[in-house]
Amino acid sequence: MFEQSISTLAQKLRDKDISSVELTRLFLARIAKFDPQLNSFITVSEKHALEQAAAADVLLQNGKGTSLTGIPVAHKDLFCTEGTLTTCGSKMLHNFIPPYESTVTSRIQQAGAVMLGKTNMDEFAMGSSNENSFYGAVKNPWNLDMVPGGSSGGSAAAVSAGLVVAATGTDTGGSIRQPASFCGITGLKPTYGRVSRFGMIAYASSLDQGGPMAKSAEDCAHLMQAMAGFDEKDSTSAENPADDYLASLNAPLTGLKIGLPKEYFGEGLDSKVADIIMAAVKEFEKLGATVKEISLPNLQLSIPSYYVIAPSEASSNLSRFDGVRFGHRCDDPRDLLDMYMRSRAEGFGAEVQKRIMVGTYALSEGYYDAYYLKAQKIRRLIKQDFVKALEEVDVIMGPVAPTTAFGLGSKTSDPVAMYLEDIYTLSVNLAGIPAMSIPAGFADNMPVGLQIMGNYFAEAKLLNVAHQYQQHTDWHLQTPTMVKGA
Amino acid sequence: MNWEVVIGLEIHTQLSTKSKLFSGAAVGFGAEPNTQTTLVDLGMPGALPVFNKEALRMAVMFGHAINAEIGMSSVFARKNYFYPDLPKGYQTSQMDHPIVGKGFLDVMLEDGTTSRVGITRAHLEEDAGKSLHEDFQGMTGIDLNRSSTPLLEIVSEPDIRSAKEAVAYVKMIHSIVTYLGICDGNMAEGSMRCDINLSLRPKGQQEYGTRTEIKNVNSFRFIEKAIYTEIERQADILEDGGRIIQETRLYDPEKNETRSMRSKEDANDYRYFPCPDLLPVVLTQEYVDNIKATLPELPSQKAARFQSEHALSEYDANVLSSSRAMADYFEVANGVVKDPKLAANWVMGELSKLLNQEQLDIANSPVNAQAFGELLIRIKDNTINGKTAKDVFQAMWNGEGSADAIIEAKGLKQVTDTGAIEAMIQTILDANAAQVEQYRAADEDKQKKMIGFFVGQVMKASQGKANPGLVNPILAKMLKG
């Protein structure tokens, strides 16, 4: 049952083959069984989930609801959920129960989905391995010695291990796509502005974007139906209406023009990963697509640009965590300054503190022009590269990450190596375009994701391309050994 | 040494929008702490700002009123610093691209001369909350009701050269924002607060001296006094061969002194950068033009109209138009009595006198403009004379009713029956035969001086009710014999 698609489960619920309460119990049992090893959840909200499931069953009884009604999902623990602990993976928010609901979770809830809990993540979404969580590292279901990727590592691991049907994630520099790739699931980072950021705890506001993580493109489309669309509570939300993401899933790919940026296949890319990506591209050619080499010349600059812009915004966004109104406050502060300094030193982990300091430095008087403004100029160049390339091709394909999931602890002492993990994903956030990661094969028994990038607001196109591939391949249907047959 | 004072002012004007600059919370003074807040004003995680378009409209109105360039693409920036009543850890303001660019105001001084004060810019920003240090036993209470209240910060060029000029400029800004209806102008409640940048230089010197900034002065009188004390303080230091330290100072009205708050070395690096949660505010020419077309009459325009339409003197016109409330009062009263000079004299005279005595704002006058106009009608139609009118006005002020009701109740109606006046005069003349003889013997110049005695006697006998306009000619005629 845990391997079924949303469409199948929705049909079973409607046909009363199973009730939402039964389905919810089934998944809660899987969490109880497997999550002690995986650590993919920070909070499991069993009581809340069963209440929602019961309510969903009433709707289903009456023939109401959507395709998500009664379906168990989980949310990355940076979406504020009313009455449910929301930690952002940080000690800073170890006691934070929001009195409000994020737009994304609210819309998914309104569609009738059942929230099983909140998934683990790198603290404040800063990380590529999910090792930066105050609540401990998440393990990769395909190999418990490996990282699941980050920062949405909990969501990726939970979906991969069949602990939930689907989950939400957020992607600031690859945080949906890279863990999706490492855990062998499908993830979509929508166009910046397509999904509301209201109630999503900000890391880097101009880059953050929520999106779906699920087994297949079709499941992602179901989630997008609920998540996407204008929100007046988010000023950066796009006003154009959201597409019907299910409607065009089955459009043929004949004549699809695929661009392969040569910069994505250069030095640093694992040859086995490269082979898998090229095999996937071949598959698309069989489906009627044509392939063309393109260039995104400023790719290398995306790392320095991102690691100035994101920390700069973060240094400001995280100022509100000061121990005054909510979250962690140090014991017995001597005075105001002592309270600020100790609350923040105790509440934030090392990576978060590092990025706050980097960002504070980059925005400082005398350095602003050399760092922040320069990074913004590079950002415009990167955007132009994509705009130009997407005039010639419909989608751009390449690897999500240079390698498969790496070993836990193997890169924690080498931040530069960790940052290089993001080389293929960062530029997409800087440009604001949508991109997906879909399972495309295995190298040394670890999943490899294919990245598909598209034009602004072309999510329906990306889902269509991914879905067609998944109609002809079964990489997305593979299940990690640890949970097989259970 | 002969010092020249150089002053630039930053005026924080609270815009009278219904809701806050970036949230739907109501704006109001005096509510229970933390009741006028939303997630945004509290700086809750994940909360996002939504720009209040009404504040934008108000800022553009102000830009037009000071002849300024309007920022067709303005950008909100974050000003980062930690303070307990700044919930997000940054203030959303405008830095490089303000909504209002360069403009100017021609300020009329007391001596009737006009001086032009340049305005560098005016930008939108959100206010912080308040820290409450009393009643918390060594702790600090935070009230975030004011958090994210919209402010328009109006920054002048260092064009001001005296305390009087500074006050005249602030009064003019006050007058403009209240005319536009974009600020209630209530300085006691903090709706207008002023930062004073002040330096001295030897007269004739080109470059500026080192300046200090006096923060948050919130009355016209304190602005004037703060400037005088700061000039004195700086002059004393300079004349003793000392140097001015660039710093932020506070004015203490009780001690009438400024004292150091923080030096430049302690100043924050605010790390301004464009706010990624808000898009640039891009205006169309049509939007800007529409606001210009619907701009209400401004103080200078109103003063000019009062001169041309009502034939008031320049002085009267300027006084009456200095506040919108006073101008409105005058116009309503004049609409009733249809005698601009009479209305102007009474608004600037008796009404202002009583308002000053009781320190009341004209908007809170116990006698409204309509009732006031009805009183003036009774002066104009000779029902009562000016002296009696003052008593009637005082009775109206005390809430005893309308002018007519009071005149009726107290029997104050002027005697305008010429027969009755003649009889009254005859009685006076009979009783004062000696004075009549003297009068008749005197030359014309002396007679003019002597007639006052008889007028006084008549008014006394009539208990002030005899119409002086009638008494005088009748008396003159009867004295002739």
Image: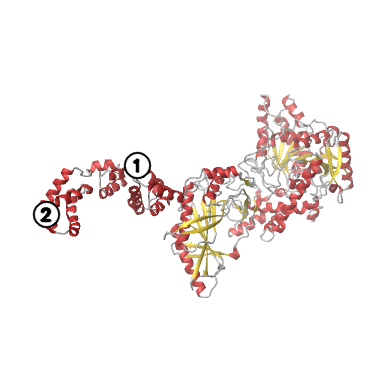
Which comes before the other along the chain, label 1 or label 2?
Answer: 1
Question: Left or right of A458: which side holds B225?
Answer: left
- Helix or strand or loop: what does disc 1 sit on? helix
Q: Nearer the viewer, residue A218 or B249?
A: B249
Amino acid bearing label 1: Val
Residue at numbered disc 2: B432
Q: Nearer the viewer, residue A304 or B47?
A: A304
Q: Is residue B287 above or below residue B152?
A: above
* Residue at x 18%, y 55% (from the top left corner): B451
Q: Nearer the viewer, residue A61 or A378?
A: A378
Amino acid bearing label 2: Asn
* Label 1 chain ID: B
What label sits on residue B336 in the rendered view? 1
- Helix or strand or loop: what does disc 2 sit on? loop
Badge 1, how many Cα within 10 Å: few under 14, some, many 20+?
A: some
Badge 2, how many Cα within 10 Å: few under 14, some, many 20+?
A: few
Q: Nearer the viewer, residue A43 or A258?
A: A258
